[in-house]
Image: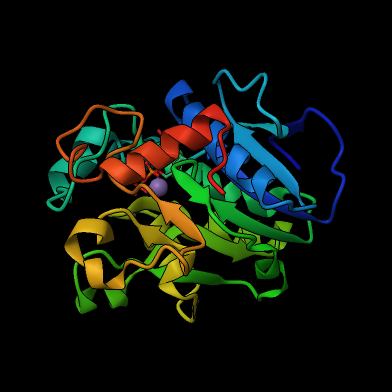
Amino acid sequence: MDGLLPNRPASSTRAFVTLVTNDDYVRGARALINSLRATGTTADIVVMHTDARVEGLDARLVRCDLLPTSDAFNAAHARDALHARAAFTKGGKPPFHTPLDNFAKLRLWQLEYERVVFLDADTLVLKDIDKLFDYPEFCAAPNVYEGVGDFHRMNSGVFTARPSQATFDAMMARLDVPDAFWRRTDQTFLQEFFPDWHGLPVFYNMLQYVWFAMPELWSWDEIKVLHFQYEKPWQDHDKVEKLRPLIDLWHAYERGEIPQ
Ligand code: UDP
Ligand code: MN
């Protein structure tokens, strides 16, 4: 637990974990927590956080530092440098998104839990997903939102993990090597670290662009986790009208109104 400071003891061996490094993502975490509570899960709900207004969140709060990466690593993954070298052409990243912060996700391997399901702070859990705790490390869904070519890549917004300091140390030894450039940050790193990642059905991480780009894949009955990749539902952005029903749903969860 080096570098981690919890506000209270764990009450389960299993936890849903998210990360927030600023107040914008606290909004995301609040809606996510409301959605998780509505599933009736008995696992812990954990928010790993740096400096952000997390007081009042209905979760176990674990204060953490960003990773102690080198100046060269930080410069290569600074927002402007990363956007210049590996531009996002399919969607926009919000101004409050700092790519370097993503890597702090890896600290979940330092938590004391036996099993973790990680969820980005921009997700909503629409159905009980506790069975994922019985799945092996490392399971994730493909990064599908445009077409079959997307199946080559996984998305790191939802995944299963078994915390272990040894794994964390092995990750640190691989992450910040000379000339390292992880173009999609933790996502690229995790896909390389777990090349045999187990594929979850896309419904465990349904990306919001599927709504307009691949509507034949959309199925409310099957979707377990909805993920607002790229633009966030609490932001004003150019796809708001295209995504209106999804954004309205997110706001209902943020208010604590759980759709039946
Ligand atoms: N995150 C954060 N602060 C940041 C960037 C990322 O707290 O500045 C966390 C947050 O949990 C977020 C996740 O890392 O959901 C990944 O970033 P994001 O969801 O914005 O990426 P996308 O899903 O759009 O690729
Ligand atoms: Mn995300």
The quadrant of the rendering that contains the N terminus is: top right
Q: Position of residue 161 (x, y in %)?
A: 64, 63
Residue situated in front as seen by the camera: 40 or 111? 40
Residue situated in front as seen by the camera: 210 or 38? 38
What residue appears at the point 42 percent right and 62 percent down from the top-left corner? 220
Answer yes or no: is residue 161 visible.
yes
Number of marks: 0
What residue appears at the point 47 percent right and 67 percent down from the top-left corner? 221
Answer yes or no: is residue 70 visible.
no
What residue appears at the point 19 percent right and 41 percent down from the top-left corner? 92
Is residue 219 positioned above or below 44 on the image?
below
Tell which quarter ligand 1 is in.
top left
Q: Position of residue 239 (x, y in %)?
A: 18, 40
For the view shown, which residue lies furthest in the front direction? 260
Residue situated in front as seen by the camera: 217 or 162? 217
Quarter residue 189 falls in? bottom left
Q: Position of residue 155 (x, y in %)?
A: 39, 62
Is residue 175 positioned above or below 79 on the image?
below
Residue 7 shown left or right of residue 228 in the figure: right
Residue situated in front as seen by the camera: 131 or 6? 131
What residue appears at the point 87 percent right and 37 percent down from the top-left corner? 9
Is residue 201 positioned above or below 51 on the image?
below
Residue 233 shown left or right of residue 37 in the figure: left
Quarter residue 232 falls in? top left
